[in-house]
Amino acid sequence: MAKFKALAITLLVSLLASVASAKEVIKVYTYHLKPPFVVREATREGLYFDAISYFNKKNNQFQFELHYLPRRRLDMMVNAGTLDGLVIGVNPLWFNDKQERRYLWTGSLLHDVDEVISSKEKAFEFTGLESLTGLRVGLVLGYYYFGVSEMAVTGKLFRDDASSEDHNFKKLLANRIDVAIISRSNHDFVMKHQPELVGKFHISSKPHDQYERRIMIPLAMAKIHHVLNTIVSQMHVDPLWKEKMASYR
């Protein structure tokens, strides 16, 4: 009897492995190499890795894999029409797709806010784009910021790019920039894990922008869109996912 049970377990494991291997592998790109989305790429830690794992558990057709891709390289693929995967954590406005006709889009993964942050000693209140005139604004290389990017091009403000949002906290403390635009998700994570920084920054009462982080899918991948959009639409009421989200705040 024991041998029969062992054989049955072995067969079941083999069957599950064959089913998993039969899934079609789908690339999911991110250019947000920052916490909480990507905390440690080498050990696959972060909210996006958790989301990919969740998607894989909730479907039997596709095996999603997360890959980092710098924004400029992603733009090159998009412009050349060679995008061979999905893009997680983005918004239609960032890809000139306000009408959502160039790509397919899932519902919201999470709501995020771009905060205007300054040092406590030089607190700054953002009242609109014009209030940034003449300031040195800390942004992230390759990222687009509504209105701000355009002001930088015309010379109305000084764009000071960093490789990540995290670096702009240090630049603020060193008075290398006047203000920085940093996502609330990143700010909250940094403050949670670097408590020595708490109380050293001022957040403007008016944010620069608010938006939904979604998943962008090429038009040719309609089947994937249907599967993924169904999962995304239901995950926010899943207690396990809600607990996972809360762990990053």
Image (cartoon, helix red, strand yellow):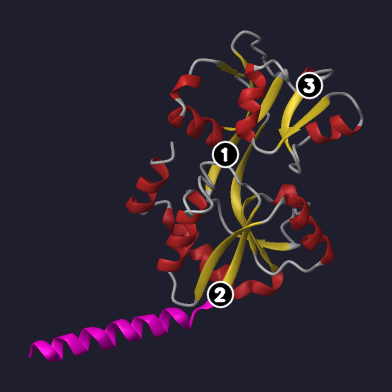
Q: Circle 1: is it few (<14), some (14-19), or many (20+) Cα within 10 Å?
A: some
Label 2–label 3 contact, CB within 8 A: no
At 44% from the left and 30% from the top, the residue drawn is 192
Q: Earlier in the sequence, mark 2 or mark 3?
A: 2
Q: Which residue is mark 3?
A: 136
Q: Circle 2: is it few (<14), some (14-19), or many (20+) Cα within 10 Å?
A: few
Left or right of residue 244, residue 83 in this image: right
Give the structural element (helix, strand or loop) at label 2. Answer: strand
Q: Earlier in the sequence, mark 1 or mark 3?
A: 1
**Residue that protrudes farthest toward the top in the picture:** 121
Under mark 3, the amino acid is Arg
Q: Which residue is mark 1?
A: 112
Under mark 2, the amino acid is Val
Residue 196 point in image, percent of width and height: 46, 20
Q: Earlier in the sequence, mark 1 or mark 2?
A: 2
At 49% from the left and 60% from the top, the residue drawn is 52
Under mark 1, the amino acid is Asp
Q: Is 211 in the magenta?
A: no
Give the structural element (helix, strand or loop) at label 3. Answer: strand
At 39% from the left and 41% from the top, the residue drawn is 246
Give the structural element (helix, strand or loop) at label 1. Answer: strand
Q: Quadrant of the N terminus?
A: bottom left
Q: CA distance from mark 1 to mark 3?
A: 24 Å
Left or right of residue 234, residue 78 in this image: right
Q: CA distance from mark 1 to mark 2?
A: 29 Å
Residue 122 point in image, percent of width and height: 66, 9
Q: Is residue 212 above or below residue 24?
A: above
**What span is in magenta?**
1-25
Residue 108 point in image, percent of width and height: 55, 51
Q: Quadrant of the C terminus?
A: top left
Q: Which mark is residue 25?
A: 2
Q: CA distance from mark 2 to mark 3?
A: 44 Å
